[in-house]
Image (cartoon, rainbow, N blue to C red):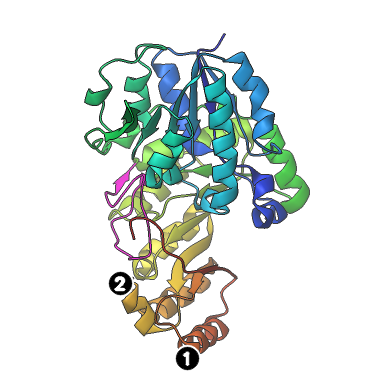
């Protein structure tokens, strides 16, 4: 019998746009947490909410773990799970209230819970894990179902006699290779494969090579990993991919990092690791225009299997980019786009509309840039304020 029930927080059916797109990725953050808990000697059960209809689907699993730990763990790597926040929050609140009624001890790691930790505690959660949480959940559960000396566990928020309290911040994990590999065996990869194959004709899985982003775009909130940028070694990543190709038959990878391959020499070293293992797979990444100006990097990406790059173009107006503290220029967007196309890589743009100060003039500039560059794909979001921005 498992002593910990681990649940993620994303319900695809509650996100109409992504449900239509049907490009589901397993909750990587939760799988890292599961692997860490197993390493500590815990027996972990995992309920993947991705294809569940709603919170009530989780109730039987909670019933089976009444009085035990319920760890609700958001996938901090996947920006898509931050959409439809109100829907996901209400579903999470339902799980918290039900688990609380069953006597579970509840700890939560999520960007929304970090931003609104008092609300989550008021719903019945016992602990909110602030920031990077693998070590926090490890220390929190070390005593089994009893917890002592909470005040000395970094990275926690909790209530004590009606008072809201927070402990010291958790230090950022610098050597990511120390982490155990994600517990992929806990996921029904066949369910993901079936949906991918039916809709797209191929199967894709997600890999995180880094944590954090050092850039300071003023609209961006980084409640989990912050501005510190740390990376797995190229060899570690290549080994993970080799395992996914061999055992899960995933021949497409989404590198879900905010910024892929920022460290000098990382992309070239990754290409060498891929070639040494004779890996054949395709992948897409996220990056910035100013990081895609060296032809050798683009050549290494293409040779490694990169077929698609999403960049935060955001706007065709330099005034808006400057207002965002984006640190990129329209000229860089143009140059990087042309360079990617030259090497057969599909450039795709993230765009924002409605940023403070934007008028019809700036919107027309964005449309003109799109018509000039003709990216392969683009995603549009409406600017809105987040806590911490």
Residue 57 drawn at (x, y percent) = 69, 30
Between 76 and 161, which is closer to the camera in this rendering? Answer: 161
Q: Residue 273 magenta-drawn?
A: no
Neighbour class for label 1 at 10 Å: few (<14), some, many (≥20)? Answer: few
Query: At numbered mark 1, what does the secondary structure look like: helix, strand or loop?
Result: helix
Neighbour class for label 2 at 10 Å: few (<14), some, many (≥20)? Answer: some
Between 71 and 99, which is closer to the camera in this rendering? Answer: 99
**Overall secondary structure of the magenta stretch?**
loop
Residue plotted at (42% across, 20% down): 37
164 vs 205, left or right, is left
Between 343 and 322, which is closer to the camera in this rendering? Answer: 322
- The stretch in magenta equals 210-231
Residue 178 can be seen in this image? yes
Residue 146 drawn at (x, y percent) = 37, 12
Between 14 and 204, which is closer to the camera in this rendering? Answer: 14
Residue plotted at (39% across, 47% down): 115
Outermost residue, right side: 198
Residue plotted at (64% across, 51% down): 15
Residue 214 drawn at (x, y percent) = 28, 56
Residue 280 can be seen in this image? no
| 49 lies above or below 138 | below
Nearer to us of marks 2 and 1 is 1
Q: Please give the label number shown on residue 361.
A: 1
Q: Which residue is mark 2?
A: 327
């Amino acid at each position: 019998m498992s002593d910990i029930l681990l649940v993620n927080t994303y319900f695809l059916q509650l996100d109409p746009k992504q449900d239509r797109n049907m490009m589901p990725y397993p909750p990587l953050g939760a799988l890292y947490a599961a692997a860490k808990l197993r390493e500590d000697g815990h027996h972990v059960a995992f309920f993947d909410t991705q294809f569940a209809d709603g919170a009530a689907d989780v109730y039987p699993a909670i019933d089976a773990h009444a009085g035990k730990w319920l760890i609700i763990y958001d996938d901090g790597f996947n920006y898509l799970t931050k959409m439809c926040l109100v829907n996901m929050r209400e579903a999470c609140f339902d799980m918290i209230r039900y688990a609380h009624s069953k006597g579970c001890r509840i700890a939560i790691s999520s960007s929304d819970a970090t931003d609104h930790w008092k609300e989550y505690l008021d719903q019945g959660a016992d602990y909110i894990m602030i920031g990077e949480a693998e070590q926090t959940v490890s220390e929190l559960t070390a005593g089994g179902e009893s917890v002592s000396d909470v005040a000395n566990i970094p990275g926690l928020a909790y209530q004590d006699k009606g008072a809201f309290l927070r402990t010291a911040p958790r230090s950022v994990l610098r050597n990511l290779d120390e982490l155990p590999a994600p517990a992929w065996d806990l996921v029904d990869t066949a369910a993901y494969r079936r949906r991918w194959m039916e809709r797209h004709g191929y199967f894709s899985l997600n890999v995180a090579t880094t944590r954090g982003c050092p850039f300071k775009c003023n609209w961006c909130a980084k409640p989990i990993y912050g501005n510190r940028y740390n990376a797995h070694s190229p060899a570690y990543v290549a080994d993970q991919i080799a395992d996914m190709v061999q055992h899960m038959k995933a021949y497409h990878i989404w590198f879900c990092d905010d910024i892929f391959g920022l460290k000098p020499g990382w992309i070239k070293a990754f290409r060498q690791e891929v070639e040494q293992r004779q890996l054949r797979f395709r992948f897409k990444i996220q990056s910035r225009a100013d990081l895609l100006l060296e032809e050798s990097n683009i050549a290494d990406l293409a040779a490694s299997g990169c077929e698609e790059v999403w960049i935060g173009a955001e706007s065709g107006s330099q005034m808006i980019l400057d207002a965002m503290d984006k640190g990129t220029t329209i000229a860089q967007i143009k140059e990087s786009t042309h360079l990617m196309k030259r090497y057969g890589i599909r450039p795709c743009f993230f765009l924002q509309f409605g940023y403070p100060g934007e008028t019809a003039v700036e919107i027309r500039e964005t449309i003109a840039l799109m018509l000039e560059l003709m990216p392969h794909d683009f995603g549009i979001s409406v600017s809105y304020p987040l806590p911490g921005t």
